Image: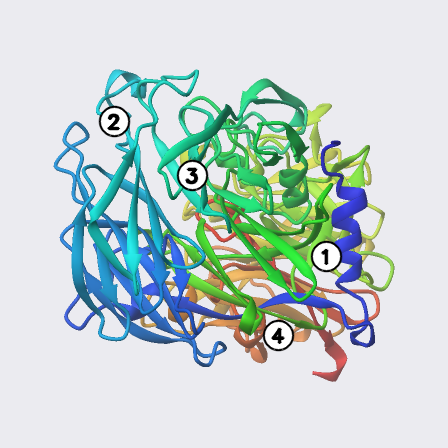
Amino acid sequence: MKAFSITTALAAALAASTASVVQAEQVFNRIASFAVATNLPEGAERNAPTSAEIITASEDGNTLIYSDSPGKRIGFIDITDAKAPEAGGIVSFSGEPTSVAVAGAKALVAVNTSESFTKPSGVLAVVDIAGRKVDATCDLGGQPDSVAVNKDRTLAAIAIENERDEDVNDGQIPQMPAGDLVILSLKDGAADCATIKHVTLTGLAEVAGDDPEPEFVAFNGRDEIALTLQENNHIVVIDGKSATVKTHFPAGTVDLEAIDTKRDGSIAFTGEQAGRKREPDAIKWLDDRLVVANEGDYEGGSRGFTIFDTTGKVLYESGAGFERAIASIGHYPEKRSSAKGVEPEGLELAQFGEDKLFFVLSERASIVGVYKDTGGEPELVQLLPSGVSPEGAVAIPGRNLFATANEVDLVEDGGARSHVMIYERAEGEAAYPQIRSVEKDGLPIGFGALSGLAAADKPGFLHAVNDSVFSSQPTIFTIDATQKPALITEALPIIRDGAPAQKLDIEGIANDGEGGFWLASEGNSDKLYSHALLHVNKKGEIKQEIALPEELRANEIRYGFEGVAVVGEGDDQVLWMAVQREWKDDEKGFVKLVSYKPSSKEWGAVRYPLEKSEEGWVGLSEISVHGDYAYIVERDNLIGEAAKLKKLYRVALADLKPAALGGELPVVNKEEVRDLIPDLQSLNGYVVDKVEGFAVDAAGNGYVVTDNDGVDDSSGETLFFSIGAMDAM
């Protein structure tokens, strides 16, 4: 069947998200986020990395259970009130839990106890959910990965991967010992170790057939087991009762066109990958069909998902459609995506009302695609924001709930913790995305790392810029905020000497009053970026580059201009730039607002007092002018529960009286306009750190945008919202 089309599917889905409640549109919205670190036991190091990888739910749907491999434990979350999840404790092991499934009152946990790659071992631990204790263990004879339970809870299947060592022979397979599949009987959730059967999988795959590496396992209602051999690019169907192979087939290849294949600081859908091996990870049954997520791990990864029948016939191939849909909402991970794109890894499937839905988890883009199974071409109905790198998911249709486990913990870099995210399906509008792009020539406008805003000449329209994440693609975007979600309708490249400008970190934009723009570029000497002001015309061509005077350069650090605003016109026009942090000549707690008058080339500055913070640092990230005020975004660099300061202030223009550089600078008075943290919490995720853009449109309404860092060590979420009429504040 044909590959997924953004125009016919995603656009329709996003349009449907604005349907009135009268139409009883059923949508998922995130209702809570749970930081895994809050479930650490008493006495544990609070800043130790945690993880939520595979996740499941108790049969009453009131408890989530996730594996935390780095911590050698599983964790429990009480979601009796799904909007207010509570820590439910942990159970620790001597090895690393790789997967968890529920059978009645018991949780079955696959635990890797391997001494080395060449001496793999593992156990299946039976955990009493209510008592939070291990009842028994079964020796599995190898290193386990995925575990699954059949419908009537009489059988469990465990994929024994015996994974390869990527440091041996450049990771080439075969590497012994070979993996297999373990099947055992269950009674009241308890495992009968004496019934263990090993299903031999050697000799099946065309790729390293003597070294099968099973990855993911799933039962259907007839006790048939679907199993992926990821590195072997193969799929096997096994009869669970007899423990025999029924059928098997290669996962095959995909020819990908119009994809981004270079890590070069730009999103350019100009590359191709012919004969790309699917190398599927997760697998689920769609009645008599199979759907696989083609993450890739060894020599492949085809960026999407595929639906097969049990003979291996391809019934539907998503191709590059899934990641193009992701790119259209700003989640394309350009810095990490050259080979495998958005890396679809996890899958979940459930019946919600009349809709059979399956959920495709993108590890690198931190997005979940929600698809409706039509029996033919699936329909993309939503894209859900997740935490950083969703690994596992569980649907609880009886409560209209869905949850994701997000494995990456960035605590050591001062970033977001690992989270479990909870969503509810109900009548209403989809809250996310808040901004997306239109297609040009059948492909989405790639965007991300939005770092500054400026008003356009029409109410509800704005301009935005991206920062140095897209160092090869500095761009001015046009936003139509009269739509919901807001639409990026145009992308204007910033050009120097006929080519995309290099060595820029655009953090601010303002209209020059003549159809062009003033841009503020934040310098970083370590990357040979210079602090500068740029003047571009309406074609995006740089007509003037203005370096900082020596009085400023002598005291520079890399935290430079984070915004630019224009006051006045003609010969009286003055530019104002907000410097993010204290430079070498600044008193602690004060930063400069720098002025520049183009007609006379005069520089000046005032001092702006920063709020104090007990942790991290505080700085400015935007300046914009409306009416009699300059509006300034002030924020800390903290994220999640640690974030305390994300506020909008204003300074009267009458107080902006610059003094000459090098002398005593006057201190301006500021007035708080709005605490933005409640706005950042409105989507029930964690509070992001980078509130980077603010502007007031031609109708006097204020708009805010966050910088998603191009999905680099970030959830990728771009929040774009209006705070209403500024004259009323």
> Which comes sooner in the sequence, label 2 or label 1?
2
Relative vertical location of residue 704 with respect to residue 294 in this rendering, above or below: below
- How is the protein colored in the picture? rainbow
In the picture, residue 72 is in which quadrant?
bottom left
Rounded to the nearest whole Å, what is the CA distance between mark 4 and mark 3? 69 Å
Whether residue 589 is visible here, answered yes or no, is: no
Rounded to the nearest whole Å, what is the CA distance between mark 2 and mark 1? 51 Å
Left or right of 210? Residue 360 is right
Check disc 3 and report its element: helix, strand or loop. strand
Residue marked by disc 1: 454
Q: Amino acid at mark 1?
A: Ala
> Which comes sooner in the sequence, label 1 or label 4?
1
Rendering coords of residue 482 (x, y %): 82, 63
Q: Residue at x 76, y 80 (%)?
A: 727
- Disc 4 vs disc 3: which is toward the camera? 3
Check disc 4 and report its element: helix, strand or loop. strand
Rendering coords of residue 95 (x, y %): 17, 49
Rounded to the nearest whole Å, what is the CA distance between mark 1 and mark 3? 62 Å
Left or right of 479? Residue 424 is left
Residue 650 is tagged as: 4
Check disc 1 and report its element: helix, strand or loop. strand
Q: Nearer the viewer, residue 133 or 30?
A: 133
Check disc 2 and report its element: helix, strand or loop. loop
